[in-house]
Amino acid sequence: MKVIKIAQVPPPVVPITATIRQAVPIMGSEQGCALAVMDGDRLAGTLSKEEVMKRVIAGGLNPDTTKVGEIMRFPAETISVDTEAGEALRLMFAHGRCYYPVVDGQGVLRGWLSLCNLFKNHVEDLDHELNALESYLSADGPGG
C-alpha cells in the first residue's frame, strides 16, 4: 500500500515564523510528535518534540520568543507519495525516524506519515485477516 493512503492528510503544519509556544499545541492536537514547517507553500523543515526538548527547554530558550525556524530540522527528509508502506517502515528504522513528510514529484507536501499511522494500518490489516479466518473456520461447510 502506498504511504499516501495511510498518511495524515492534511498534514500538521506550522509557519516558519511561528513561536515554539504556538507550535507545540499543534503538535499535540494531531496526536503526533512532530510537524511540517512551512515557508509559504514550501516545506522548509520539520519540528519534533525532541528538538523542542533539547534545544528550547534544555537550552534555556524562551518558547514565547524562539521561532520555529530557529530550531527546526532542515532540510526536511521526505518520502514520496509513491513509497510503499513497508519501505517507509524500513527507512524509519534505518534512519531512526518516527515520521516523514510525504511529498509529490514536485516536492509539494501532501501528507504526514508517522510510525503511529503505519502501526495503526498494520493492526487494522491484521484484524481484517483475523476476522476473515474466523469466518472461514466457523462456516459449517459449503453454503454456510
Image (spheres, rainbow, N blue to C red):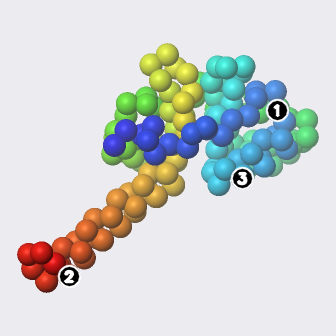
Can you identify the residue that label 1 sits on? 18
Can you identify the residue that label 2 sits on? 138
Can you identify the residue that label 3 sits on? 28
**What residue is shown at x 64% (from left), y 34% (from top)?**
36
124 versus 27 height, above or below: below
Tell me whether the residue at label 2 lies in contact with that at label 1, contact meaning CB atoms closer than 8 angstroms: no
**What residue is shown at x 76% (from left), y 29% (from top)?**
15
Could you say which quadrant of the image residue 4 lies in? top left
Q: Is residue 110 left or right of residue 60?
A: left
Question: SS of the residue at dot 3?
Answer: helix
Q: Nearer the viewer, mark 3 or mark 2?
A: 2
The answer for how far apart the CA atoms under marks 3 and 2 are is: 43 Å
The three-letter amino acid code for the residue at tag 2 is Ser
71 versus 85 height, above or below: above
Q: Is residue 110 in view from this perspective?
A: yes
Q: Position of residue 67 (x, y in %)?
A: 82, 32
141 versus 12 height, above or below: below
Check disc 3: other Cα within 10 Å, few if <14, some if 14-19, many if 20+.
some
Please report whichever mark, 3 or 1, sits nearer to the chain's N-terminal start: 1
Please report whichever mark, 2 or 1, sits nearer to the chain's N-terminal start: 1
Looking at this view, name the residue that lies furthest to the left: 142
Q: Position of residue 60 (x, y in %)?
A: 86, 45
The quadrant in which the N terminus is found is top left
